Amino acid sequence: MSGIFYVIGTPIGNMEDITLRQLDTLRSVDFVCAEDTRVTVKLFNRYEIKKPLVSFHEHSTRASAEAIIGRLIAGESCGIVTDAGMPCISDPGELLVKLCAENGIEVRVVPGPSAVVSAVAVSGLPTSRFMFEGFLPVNKKQRAERLELLRNESGLMVFYEAPHKLRTTLADLESFFGRDRRISLCRELTKVHEEVLRMTLGEAVEYYETTVPRGEYVLVLEGQTVQTSDELTIDDALVRVRKLVEMGERPVDACKAIAKECGFRKSELYSAFCGEE
């Protein structure tokens, strides 16, 4: 009989945010898969947990994953943790869950803190519907394509961002969603320097021109309010076309994408765009 694979949430910053069930599970499994064993050892030392750790991260091979599955099939139980929060979400552990499902191995969740849900809860924005986007692509063209898909999203959008990339990301969000769109910037959640800033995108860009970003950020962006196509002028549409072109799209493809949103013909936008040059 195969063992059980436990998906175990861990604190996102404050080590006291751990449950009795999480501790009991970590102590009962045969071994634990960790994104970074150096980080997990600190948690284990704090709570006197002595279990073998197996490193499993974004650079781990398929063979490493299959070796873990082999141990489960042989009857061992395994827990998986990430550096902070819930593993297997925008995280290498999702492959192990997939392989467990394919091999008939039981998967149980031991839930814990989540930076996404925590940030939404304190955002001060309407929370009835939201979508998690994780980190935006670094490649300019891919980033533009992703943001273009989100332009008309009406629910909250949640992004992760590192401090050294925050200014660029805020500038890109302002370009696509406008300076008046509201955003909550949640920094270092549950840690000593926890901070939640609620402002517009324009204000956020200006604020970080003189403030050095520090710590890990969760950005919660307000969704689009309903806007009829006749409220959008061709000049508004051309602003969107130019932004896509600046980020690497061919003019004809940019015009095609914006035409689908705005009700203008692709040829109309393309002619107007070429007439500007």
Image: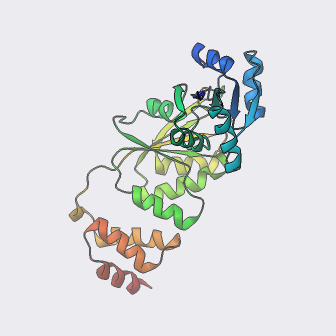
Q: How many marks can you see?
A: 0
- When asked about the image quadrant of residue 73, the answer is top right
Quarter of the image with the C terminus in it: bottom left
Q: Residue furthest front?
A: 1
The front one of 110 and 144 is: 110
The front one of 125 and 59 is: 59
Task: Name the residue: 34% across, 85% down.
Answer: 271
- Colour scheme of the picture: rainbow
Task: Name the residue: 30% across, 72% down.
Answer: 234
- Give percent across and percent down for residue 154: 33, 48
Asked whether the viewer can see residue 49, the reply is yes
Vertical placement of 236 versus 19: above or below? below
**In the image, 103: left or right of 179?**
right
- Give percent across and percent down for residue 253: 41, 76
Task: Name the residue: 34% across, 55% down.
Answer: 152
- Give percent across and percent down for residue 160: 56, 44
The front one of 125 and 86 is: 86
- Give percent across and percent down for residue 67: 70, 41
Task: Name the residue: 53% across, 73% down.
Answer: 248
Quarter of the image with the N terminus in it: top right
Vertical placement of 250 versus 221: above or below? below
**In the image, 192: left or right of 185?**
right
